[in-house]
C-alpha cells in the first residue's frame, strides 16, 4: 500500500475546488437529508444538507451545520422567523430532485415547486415535510452555537414529531434504513443506496473485562 502525506501547508495551497472535494470526502459516508422550512408569507423552502448530527435523546435533539452567513441563507432566515424546520431522509427515487435543491434559487422561489417534490403538512407545526420521504422529523429550534473557527453555526432543534414508515421500525426502536432505499453519500455530489447492516451486541462493563 502506497501512502502520501498532505501537510496543512499543502492543504492551504490547494486549488479551491480540489480542497473542497478532498476535505468533504475525508469523513467518508454522511447521509443527505432535506430540510424543509417556510417563511412568514407561507413560501416554502427545501435545502439538502449532509451535516445532520445526533445531539441527545433526552431531550430528543438533532442538529446541523449552517455555512457562514456571507450570502442569503433562506433556511436559516425561515427557521429564525418561523421557529420550526423538518428533516427528511432521501431515497433513491428522490435522489436527482433532492440534489437539485442545492441550486441557488432566488428568494421567494420554492424548491418544492422547482424540483417537483411534494410537501406534506402537520397540524402541530408549520414547516413542510417531504411527502415521499419515509422518515420525516419536525423540530423546533432550541439554540444555535457559533463556531468561530470558520464562522459556521450549529443549529440545534428539539424533535416535536416523527413520521416513519411502520415496517422500518423494530420493536426495540431500531430503524432499518435499508428499506425504501434510503441514501447515504460522499462529499457533495455522490450518492449510494444502503444495504442491510449487521448489529453487534452492546459492550457493557462486564463484557469489557472479557476482552
Image (tube, rainbow, N blue to C red):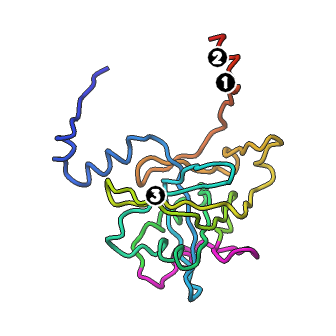
**Residue 36 x, y percent position in the rendering:** 58, 70
Residue lying at 54% horizontally and 79% vertically, measured from the top left: 81
Residue range in magenta is 106-128
Marks 3/1: CA–CA distance? 30 Å
Q: Are marks 2 and 1 in contact (CB under 8 Å)?
A: yes
Q: Secondary structure at mark 2?
A: helix
Q: Which residue is mark 2?
A: 208
Q: Quadrant of residue 198?
A: top right
Task: Please indicate whether residue 40 sits to the left or right of residue 18 in the image.
Answer: right
Q: Secondary structure at mark 1?
A: loop
Q: Quadrant of residue 4?
A: top left
Q: Residues within 10 Å of mark 2 (few under 14, many from 20)?
A: few
Q: Which residue is mark 3?
A: 65
Q: Residues within 10 Å of mark 1 (few under 14, many from 20)?
A: few
**Quadrant in the picture for the C terminus:** top right
Earlier in the chain: of badge 3 and badge 1, it is: 3
Give the residue furthest to the top.
210
Give the residue furthest to the bottom.
41
**Residue 145 x, y percent position in the rendering:** 46, 59
**Quadrant in the picture for the N terminus:** top left
Amino acid at each position: 500500500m502506497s501512502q502520501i502525506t498532505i501537510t496543512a501547508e499543502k492543504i492551504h495551497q490547494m486549488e479551491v475546488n480540489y480542497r473542497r472535494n478532498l476535505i468533504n470526502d475525508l469523513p467518508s459516508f454522511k447521509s443527505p437529508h432535506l430540510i424543509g422550512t417556510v417563511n412568514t408569507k407561507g413560501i416554502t423552502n427545501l435545502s439538502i444538507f449532509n451535516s445532520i448530527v445526533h445531539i441527545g435523546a433526552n431531550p430528543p435533539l438533532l442538529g446541523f451545520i449552517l455555512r457562514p452567513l456571507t450570502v442569503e441563507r433562506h433556511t436559516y432566515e425561515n427557521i429564525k422567523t418561523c421557529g420550526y424546520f423538518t428533516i427528511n431522509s432521501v431515497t433513491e427515487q428522490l435522489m436527482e430532485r433532492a440534489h437539485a435543491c442545492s441550486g441557488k434559487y432566488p428568494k421567494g422561489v420554492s424548491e418544492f415547486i422547482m424540483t417537483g417534490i411534494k410537501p406534506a403538512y402537520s397540524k402541530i407545526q408549520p414547516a413542510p415535510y417531504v411527502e415521499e420521504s419515509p422518515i420525516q422529523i419536525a423540530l423546533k429550534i432550541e439554540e444555535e452555537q457559533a463556531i468561530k473557527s470558520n464562522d459556521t453555526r450549529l443549529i440545534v432543534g428539539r424533535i416535536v414529531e416523527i413520521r416513519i414508515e411502520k415496517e422500518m421500525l423494530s420493536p426495540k426502536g431500531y430503524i432499518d434504513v435499508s428499506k425504501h432505499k434510503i441514501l447515504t453519500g460522499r462529499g457533495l455530489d455522490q450518492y449510494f443506496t444502503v444495504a442491510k447492516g449487521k448489529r453487534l451486541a452492546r459492550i457493557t462493563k462486564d463484557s469489557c473485562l472479557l476482552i
